[in-house]
């Protein structure tokens, strides 16, 4: 598939990088990401809190945020912050930066969040645990007309899409919901979603083909 011609500001999103920062940068390059023009949303779980080798990703994410990207907290970052009250391997600047990050972001017709929301509860009253850890209580519950989040399409990660009965490495979409954790942590794929151009960019995270098998895929028209 030929590379698209970029002619307008785009809304991009990626989730659950889990230390695969080289693959993240590769996808941004393939998508011709321009931080002066495009809005990038990073949905959390940049690391595995129990794997200090993955913490290098925080510097990349912090740099992207300094250039205009919106970074959200995931459950792995919360776990790291909790552990760092006892273990001081996390630098103070990274710790302070993580503590400043929000749990969700609204942009255009989309709500971005790491794990999801608890239907029926206003955004301001959502618990940090639900925003970073909820699964079935969000994915399979209907949003009612009374729901504050009902007008938005919710873009989320946390739950690998292969657990939602799609092929490993593929996006999942349901009722006003799009799951974009395509299993990078599990050796499947890391995916960058372009909501403006209706494209996804993905590459392998398998140990034998990291960054390989690049795909640019058109999204279904209703997404």
Image (cartoon, rainbow, N blue to C red):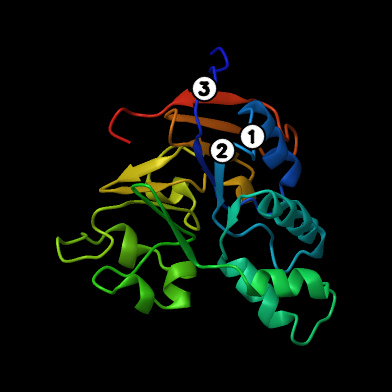
The residue singled out by tag 1 in the image is 34
- Furthest toward the left, the residue is 145
x then y, percent, for residue 158: 50, 58
Viewed as shown, does residue 159 lie left or right of 74?
Answer: left
Q: CA distance from mark 2 to mark 1?
A: 6 Å
User: What secondary structure is marked by label 2?
Assistant: loop
Q: Of callouts 3 and 1, which one flags the residue occurring earlier in the amino acid sequence?
A: 3
Report the residue at 69% width, 62% height from top: 48
Residue 95 appears at what percent x and percent y?
74, 74
Q: Residue at x 71, y 33 (%)?
A: 26
Q: Which residue is mark 2?
A: 38
> Looking at the image, which residue is at 54% across and 24% down?
216
Q: Picture quarter containing residue 61?
A: bottom right
Position above or below: 122 against 14: below
Dividing the picture into quadrants, the one containing residue 124 is bottom left
Q: Are marks 2 and 3 in contact (CB under 8 Å)?
A: no
Work out whether mark 2 precedes mark 3 in sequence or the reverse, and give the earlier one.
3
In the rendered image, the vertical position of residue 52 relative to residue 33, given as above or below? below
* Tag of residue 7: 3
In the image: residue 189, left or right of residue 221: right
Q: Position of residue 168 (x, y in %)?
A: 50, 39
**Considering the numbered disc 1 on the image, is that residue within a helix, a strand or a loop?**
loop
Q: Are discs 2 and 1 less than 8 Å apart at CB? A: yes
Residues tagged 3 and 1 counted as in contact (Cβ below 8 A): no
């Amino acid at each position: 598939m030929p590379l698209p011609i970029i002619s307008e500001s785009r809304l991009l999103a990626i989730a659950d990088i889990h230390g695969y920062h080289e693959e993240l940068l590769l996808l941004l390059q393939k998508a011709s990401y321009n931080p002066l023009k495009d809005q990038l949303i990073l949905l959390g779980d940049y690391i595995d809190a129990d794997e200090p080798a993955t913490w290098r990703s925080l510097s990349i994410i912090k740099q992207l945020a300094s250039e205009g990207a919106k970074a959200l907290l995931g459950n792995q970052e919360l776990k790291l912050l909790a552990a760092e009250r006892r273990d001081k391997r996390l630098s103070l600047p990274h710790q302070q930066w993580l503590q400043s990050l929000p749990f969700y972001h609204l942009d255009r017709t989309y709500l971005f969040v790491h794990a999801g929301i608890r239907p029926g509860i206003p955004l301001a009253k959502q618990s940090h645990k639900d925003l970073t850890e909820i699964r079935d209580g969000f994915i399979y519950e209907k949003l009612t007309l009374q729901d504050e989040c009902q007008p938005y399409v919710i873009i989320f990660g946390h739950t690998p899409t292969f657990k939602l009965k799609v092929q490993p490495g593929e996006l999942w979409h349901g009722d006003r919901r799009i799951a974009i954790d395509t299993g990078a942590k599990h050796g499947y794929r890391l995916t960058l979603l372009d909501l403006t151009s209706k494209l996804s960019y993905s590459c392998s995270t398998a140990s034998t083909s990291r960054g390989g098998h690049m795909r640019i895929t058109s999204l279904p028209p209703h997404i």
